[in-house]
Amino acid sequence: MNYKNLPAKNNLLFLIFILCFFFSLAYSQPTKRLPEKAIDVSGFYDSAHHWKDITGDEQVIRLLPDQKRYKPKQVKEIAGNILLYQQKNGGWPKNYDMLAILTADQKKILKEGKDSLRTTFDNGATHSQVEYLAKAYSLLKDKRYADAALRGIQFMLDAQYPNGGFPQFYPDTSGYRKYITFNDGAMIGVMKVFYNIVRNDPDFSFVDEAARERVEKAYNKGIDCILKCQIVENGKLTVWCQQHDNIDFSPRGARTFELPSKCGDESADIVLFLMSIQNPGEAIISSVKSAVEWFKESELHGIREVTIKAPKVVFKYRTSVTDRIVVKDPNAPPVWARFYALGTNKPFFSDRNGIAVDSLSKVGRERRDGYTWYNYEPQKVLDKYPRWLKEIERKD
């Protein structure tokens, strides 16, 4: 057929038909979905656990009996939750589950209650949300995530003391909330975010140069604070307390059962962070070496903590259905106590009455079963230490 002999109008109609045909073929193909990729949500575990298992009066929404959760691959939905929980000051409250599928009423309450001063770094709050949003932005390129993360970073900068430390809560620094807090990874969580920005982690590419410079200054002050908090006994560096004074860096207590002490768990978290720093200075190297020596000297051998079933008891803050005992076991791996006494370095335990005792069995069941008294975190340091030391010596 000779298309040139067709009338011009017919030629035009035929051309439109052909174009429509090929466009329909193109758009009828299945749309390719972006590959699903989960973002680590472990930073939200502590707060989610507390929302579920601990009765408190600070939550504006309560966990429902049938509350379902998003799967880790549902990044958009989880990030949406994180945006809902962020307060006007840029921080986040603790003890909610970022993966919970919220009801319309719960969302309404969160949207209307953005003026909370209970923003904190405790139980993974704020620094975990900022880190997640940075990764979510890298994955989905939603500008809202970058903007929220920047507000969170500014909140961290605002909360930092001139001496480099971070309180547990901000702006509410009443009581022990004002102390420089290593408990539950509070300050170290912030420092990890700062370090990722300083070392130009691609996930934080949205942080401009001016903000990056502010973060670097804050990071350097934070490192200096960590080193100043390390406890010295008999002229020798040891480890850290859960909390330190925000003025003179001395060990401080927090809750009644958290007395001033040397702490194996929190100290391990600090040392692992210091060991992650590329090209550390002599002060950091000395700090790590001294802490490792303390970990080795403070190992406990021949015992194992065991959780056993027990009659259900409803306490003020929680319900217990188990108990914990310490049994002798010559084959048990080394373990560390949560608290070691200042000066004597003897393990101790405590109840809500604030009295130190020398045995877990002397602690009432509510705290005995409701707190972590033994841990294996220092072993992670000891496992990584030989390779770290070899790397340091090679660079020297």
Image (cartoon, rainbow, N blue to C red):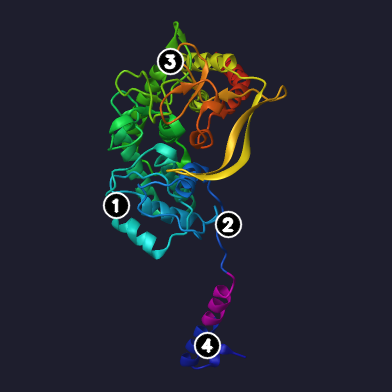
How far across and down, in percent of the image, does residue 212 sit?
36, 35
In the rendered structure, which disc, 2 or 3, sits on the residue that comes first in sequence? 2
Q: CA distance from mark 1 to mark 2?
A: 34 Å
Magenta stretch: helix, strand or loop mostly:
helix
Give residue 250's quadrant in the image. top left
Determine which of the numbered discs, if any, sits on residue 231 in the image.
3
Residue highlighted by disc 2: 35
Residue highlighted by disc 4: 14
Q: Under tag 1, what secondary structure?
A: loop
Magenta residues (range): 19-30
In the rendered structure, which disc, 3 or 4, sits on the residue that comes first in sequence? 4
**Residue 159 as seen in the image, left or right of residue 23:** left
Q: Residue at x 53, y 77 (%)?
A: 23
Q: Is residue 152 visible?
A: yes
Q: Under tag 4, what secondary structure?
A: helix
Asked if the stretch drawn in magenta spans residue 23, the answer is yes
Give residue 197's quadrant in the image. top left
